[in-house]
Image: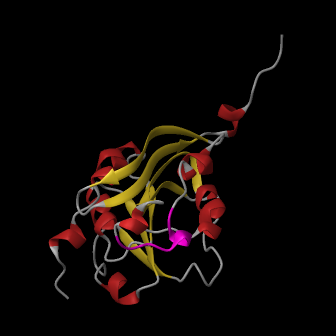
């Protein structure tokens, strides 16, 4: 199968923050499709777990050094990863609210969370238009509040690669020690 350039070009948001993940770390590319981010991350020296429900798309990653694949429909089966497994998690153009807690727990302390997907307002521009698949204003910030340090957050209209309303975040999971308050006098 010949892939179009757009399918292989990684998101500028992912490229901007990927190198914050610990060198040689393990990264989950969730809902990876044909693996544009998995390929990019493996090229940077990360060990990548590329997960998608489309076995044909995953097959395009066969033999790519640094990438292992897992075919799973996470909307119809249990979350397959233990807490603290990954040094980085990358998700683009995908949203399934019931996965959020387990997804965030799968990051190790110091792990980098890079997420970019569609938000409310996108329904006026095209797909997705179902509110179930659109983030509410500031929703990504609410997901990480109190447990992550937010390095960057954006929401609003973009014109490239096509007009869309997006929300995106890069955040680092704090360790338990980072979350403690010292209330002594």
- In the image, 107: left or right of 11? right
Image x and y of residue 123, in percent: 42, 68
In this view of the protein, can residue 84 be seen by the observer? no
Q: Tell whether position 34 is magenta.
A: no
Task: Tell me which segment is drawn in magenta.
Answer: 126-134
- Chief secondary structure of the magenta portion: loop
Q: Quadrant of the N terminus?
A: bottom left
Q: Measuring 36% from the left and 82% from the top, which residue is drawn there?
A: 58
Judge whether residue 35 can be spotted in this image: yes
Q: How many marks?
A: 0
* Picture coordinates of residue 146, whole percent (x, y): 66, 40
Q: Is residue 176 above or below residue 87?
A: above
Asked whether, in this view, residue 165 is left or right of residue 176, the answer is left
Residue at the limit of the structure toward the front, as seen here: 124
The residue at the point 31 percent across, 62 percent down is 42
Image x and y of residue 114, in percent: 44, 52
């Amino acid at each position: 199968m010949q892939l179009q350039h757009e399918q292989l070009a990684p998101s500028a948001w992912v490229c901007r923050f990927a190198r914050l993940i610990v060198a040689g770390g393990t990264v989950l590319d969730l809902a990876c499709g044909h693996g544009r981010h998995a390929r990019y991350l493996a090229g940077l020296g990360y060990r990548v777990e590329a997960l998608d429900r489309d076995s044909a798309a995953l097959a395009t990653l066969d033999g790519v050094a640094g990438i292992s694949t897992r075919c799973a429909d996470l909307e119809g089966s249990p979350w397959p990863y233990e807490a603290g497994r990954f040094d980085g998690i990358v998700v683009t153009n995908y949203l399934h609210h019931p996965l959020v807690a387990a997804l965030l727990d799968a990051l190790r302390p110091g792990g980098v969370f890079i997420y970019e997907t569609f938000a409310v307002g996108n329904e006026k521009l095209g797909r997705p238009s179902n509110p179930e698949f659109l983030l509410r204003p500031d929703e990504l910030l609410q997901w990480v509040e109190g447990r992550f340090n937010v390095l960057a957050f954006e929401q609003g209209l973009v014109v490239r690669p096509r007009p869309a309303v997006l929300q995106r975040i890069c955040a680092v999971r704090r360790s338990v020690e980072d979350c403690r308050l010292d209330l002594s006098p």
